[in-house]
Amino acid sequence: MNDNTKPKETTLSFEKIKQDVLRPMQTHRGLELWIVFLIAVIAVCGWAYYVQLRDGLGVTGMRDYVSWGLYIANFVFFVAVSLVGMLISSILGLLKVDWIAPISRIAEIIAVAFVAVAGLVIVLDMGRPDRLLNVFIHGRFQSPILWDVTVVTTYLVISLLLLILPMIPDLAICKKEMTNASPLLKKVYSILSFGYTNTPQQHKHLHRMVRTLMVLIVPVGLAIHTVTSWLFAATLRNGWDTTIFGPYFVAGAFVAGAAGLVIAMYFFRVNYKLQDYLTDLHFDKMGKLMVAVCLVYIYFNVNEFLVPGYKMKSGDNTHLKELFLGSWAIMFWASQLLGNIIPVILMVNKRFRKPLPLMIISLFVLASAWFKRYVIVIPTMLHPHLPIQNVPDNFKHYFPTPIEIAIIVLSFALALLIMTVLAKIFPVVPICEIAEKEGIDYKIED
């Protein structure tokens, strides 16, 4: 490990690491109140979904022309944030970047929560969700929808395995140390620890399985956002008819995922009192990583608009003028400036890569990422090739209804609930891996 990447000196011991990581799981009452609040939000917003099921998609602002609205924009956003698991645990893990050890599990928790809810968001967009099974029974290989369902499901499964398998040594510790846990939770720890006692053979096999999954998830992670981009790019609509959408979506996903991870890191650092593990160094490194992925994303943004702007076909002319100067200009430029350009200018300065400033910057980046997906979806559908004639006025515009907004809030609350529950029952920082990185010897008794 190089001197410039070496963590600050601490007085860590194996007992201290166990106490620091396991304590919030047992005594954090604020977390329980947060769970109650999220359940209440889900219950209230669930009523909005019941209304949509009862009355149909007519309760939304979507019509014949804008048939994709808030839900699909939200789906693309959720898929984007979930890619942080592949970026941190797999790409940087395979490159043997040491500083990711304390944050890789948080990245996987985010990945599992957001990709799981991304699948549900698609169901929320269906007028007849009872027909979802037909995708699996009668799906056609020619359909990008089938590809999307396949890669989302595969990514979820591998992300779950990448969350649980590296956690097996810690779960063996939880089985012994979490004496106040409920009988059901103790049973979960006992089952998922698989009798692990950290023998050399067990350690070798576990390490090999994790490395295999880290390799497998890279093409799946790239495919999940590439296939999502194909759902757009396979059409001839102005704004979507481009071959650059695959890498463009992946680059944007890295930006959104990195920002979401920084926010989660700050939350756990402050509320779980994990300053010895989620250090200033980790925020500094994440700030540098965000600069890198933002620069790549800026490059693809320039390519996305420069080429059609140079050719300026009639349809692209209308679309780009609306984005740059028309009714979408404020949202478009705000997402570009607050989500890419200004954050890069700030984060090249080390003072803004401290925990609190970086967290605030990440909030703007993440919010801008959501609005960027909204700008990708809606304006294009408002500019069809054929003129809009002899239709009601509300067909010519799209405004999300309170029902849609409530259902979107439901999806966010559900993702946060999954993250919170996982953080409540599982260690968010890897105990054994931190001990190994610090050169601390430890034993796990059955």
Image: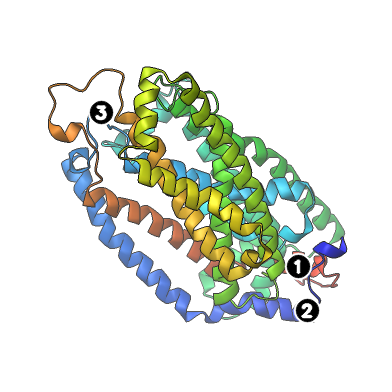
| Amino acid type at mark 2 | Leu
Where the N terminus falls, by quadrant? bottom right
**Viewer can see residue 194:** no
**Which disc number belongs to residue 434?**
1
- Say which of 408 and 129 sits in front: 408
Write the residue at 44% across / 28% down. 232
* Above or below for 243 versus 150: above
User: From where the camera sits, is residue 27 visible?
Assistant: yes
Q: Position of residue 12 (x, y in %)?
A: 78, 79
> How far, Cα to Cα, is label 2 from label 3?
60 Å
Q: Is residue 294 left or right of residue 441?
A: left
The residue pinned by badge 2 equals: 12
* Mark closer to the chain start, 2 or 3: 2
Q: Nearer the viewer, mark 2 or mark 3?
A: 3
* Left or right relative to 163: residue 60: left
Q: Earlier in the sequence, mark 3 or mark 1?
A: 3
Q: Which mark is residue 65?
A: 3
Disc 2 secondary structure class: loop
Kindly report which numbered mark, 3 or 1, lies closer to the viewer in this rendering.
3
